[in-house]
Amino acid sequence: MTLARWTHEHFDTLSWHDNAVHALRVVEGEYGAGLLIVDIDYILEWRPDESGGFSFLVAPPTRTFHSVSDLKVRLDYATPTAALTPFTIDRIDRRIEKRQHYDAVLWTLPVNWPDGEIAFEATGFVQELRAAPIVSRTMWLPRPAADSGA
């Protein structure tokens, strides 16, 4: 059972400000295009509290972009000597660019921290929650410690 599901048709009603990204997965497809699967902590709601701060309604979705090509990923943890942590995106931008035989949909995910950007062409996306949202004092969900592989 899907808890919640959105597609690119809901783009104008969704926000990804300050969403933590835990993983990117590239899946090969036909004719040189594929899937880009993004594991994020999706902030469904910012909730002001009486102390002037916020709590957050957060859930783990999988966001899958379809027919992805021309992928560019730039993340700079070195310049600010930042610790390796999940990065956060500022937003997701979408624009249409006229091509000779089709209208290309170009997506850009500016990264808040550290400096960076993810950009690509894709036909659209599906975002599905994997678990029910929880109220959190942080903008991200706790993760189990990763296996060190040792």
Image (cartoon, rainbow, N blue to C red):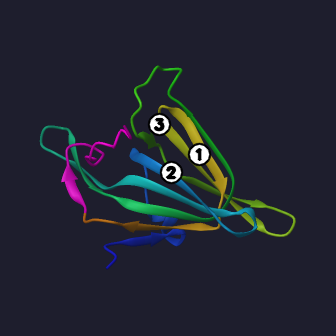
**Residue at 41% of width from left, 31% of height from top?**
84
Cβ–Cβ below 8 Å for labels 2 and 1? Answer: yes
Q: Is residue 1 left or right of residue 39?
A: left
Q: Nearer the viewer, mark 2 or mark 1?
A: 2
Distance Cα–Cα, label 2 vs label 3: 16 Å
**Residue at 20% of width from left, 44% of height from top?**
137
Q: Is residue 120 left or right of residue 53?
A: right
From the image, tell me which residue sits under label 2. 24
**Residue at 82% of width from left, 62% of height from top?**
99
Amino acid type, label 3 = Asn
Front-lying residue, 76 or 28: 28
Distance Cα–Cα, label 2 vs label 1: 10 Å
Sequence-first disc among 2 and 1: 2
Q: Nearer the viewer, mark 2 or mark 3?
A: 2
Identify whether 96 is placed above or below 112.
below
Distance Cα–Cα, label 3 vs label 1: 11 Å
Front-lying residue, 87 or 84: 84
From the image, tell me which residue sits under label 1. 118
Quarter placement of the C terminus: top left
Residue 114 at x, y percent in the picture: 48, 31
Magenta span includes 140: yes
Amino acid type, label 2 = Leu
User: Element at badge 3?
Assistant: strand
Residue 112 at x, y percent in the picture: 47, 36
The numbered mark at residue 112 is 3
State the extent of the magenta-drawn residues as a range.
133-150
Mark 3 Cα-neighbour bin, 10 Å: few <14, some 14–19, many ≥20: some
Sequence-first disc among 3 and 1: 3
Magenta span includes 147: yes
Sequence-first disc among 2 and 3: 2
Q: Nearer the viewer, mark 3 or mark 1?
A: 1
